Amino acid sequence: MSQRPLFARLILWRGNAPTIAASCIALILLRFGPGWQPWGILLAGLLVGTAIAGCFVLNSKHTGRVEILVAQLMRVNHKLNGEIQERARIETELAGARDEALELSRLKSQFLATMSHEIRTPMNGIIGMTDLLLDTGLTEEQREYADAARRCSGSLMEIIDDILDFAKIEACTLKLQRREFETRGILDGVLDLLKTRAEEKGLKLTRDLSSELPESVIGDPGRLRQMLIILIGNAIKFTERGEVFVEAKPAEWGEASVTLRVDVHDTGIGISPEQQDRLFQSFYQTDGSATRKYGGAGLGLAICKQLAELMDGKIEIESQLGKGSTFHLTVRMGLPVKDHSQGLTGLAQWTGASPVLESVEK
């Protein structure tokens, strides 16, 4: 017979306690009773016999109950072991699926980056040769065709650049520069660049650059310019009449940094609350008709959002369908400090949250 568990033996001992006590009383009477009379021996024998019989009865009764409990516990334990093994199998499969998804995402980003570079090379040749063609003596009709080819190739190059930037951001290989540049120079340059595009649509492009803006800041001027071109360019693209108003000011000053805020207001088509929730997703367009009418790959705002986050900032939108939109962009920039002892301009000891930073350029 297999040895019972400890708790089973304890249950049996507790159930047989009365009969064990009776056996002890009989032994005491037998040892310390009045002499060794036969009736005393007979009484002790009866008590001992009764105790032994009781032990057999109770032991049999409790043994049956304990065996039932042990069987139930074994079934529950077997079921739990099966569930634990199943959960371990599922966790292993999920970990494998996660690793596979990460690898696929990496390969996709690598493919996009490679293809963008491969497409960019011949496109640069097309744009360059078209520019040379426009500098030659062309008839009016030929110049019209060449101008159209130049505009289309430029638009295609913008899409290629967006895809390349998107791939770099997803692959965490985008490098942000840190160098000193003029704050107003970047803002005025973008507005002057897009002024012609607004005038072609009969729109007013106005600005309000706060006098509190720092003269110069430290950051990546190219990426800041890119975000401004995306936001202001979209405002012009989706506005048929009215104006586009750009406002820039410092939002928060730090010990060695400043948070710049740029608000872009337009009187365009507006965006519904349902569309606003998905507006910053990659390749998202508000609807199919907008894609056909205005063009674009739906990557501009997604890139803008991720660039803003890399610069410790964010981008938000306020819009009402049919009444226009306002985009709020904030980015954190370092502040330059003057080293009077050496007569040189030093860089403030500030480090942004960018994952990769290039060496400082002056």
Image (spheres, rainbow, N blue to C red):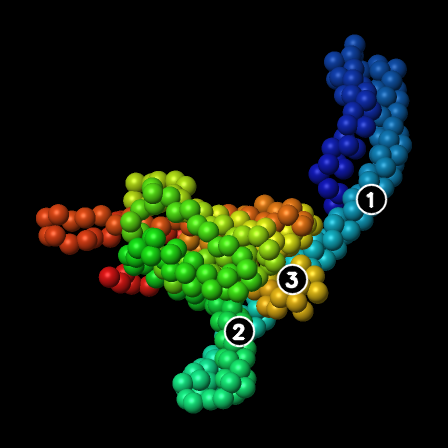
Q: Image check: 102 left or right of 292?
A: left
Identify the residue at horizontal 34%, vertical 45% (top origin). 213
Amino acid type indicated by mark 3: Gln
Residue pointed to by mark 3: 285
Identify the residue at horizontal 27%, vertical 61% (top origin). 360
Q: Position of residue 293 (x, y in %)?
A: 66, 67
Write down the quadrant of residue 159 in the picture. Answer: bottom right
Measured Cα–Cα span from mark 1 to mark 2: 74 Å
Q: Position of residue 130 (x, y in %)?
A: 46, 85
Measured Cα–Cα span from mark 1 to mark 3: 61 Å
Give the camera-side residue of 238 and 57.
238
Amino acid type indicated by mark 2: Ser
Identify the residue at horizontal 75%, vertical 55% (top origin). 82
Give the camera-side residue of 247 and 86.
247
Q: Nearer the viewer, mark 1 or mark 2?
A: 2
Specify which label sits upstream in the sequence, 2 or 3: 2
Q: Helix or strand or loop: what does disc 3 sit on? A: loop
Q: Image check: 20 left or right of 88?
A: right
Amino acid type indicated by mark 1: Gln
Write down the quadrant of residue 6 in the picture. Answer: top right
Answer few, some or many: residues within 10 Å of disc 3's Cα (few below 14, many 20 plus, some between 14 and 19). some
Residue pointed to by mark 1: 72
Checking the image for residue 155, the label placed there is 2
Q: Image check: 221 left or right of 240?
A: left
Q: Is residue 95 visible?
A: no
Give the camera-side residue of 98 and 296.
296
Answer few, some or many: residues within 10 Å of disc 2's Cα (few below 14, many 20 plus, some between 14 and 19). some
Q: Are marks 2 and 3 in contact (CB under 8 Å)?
A: no
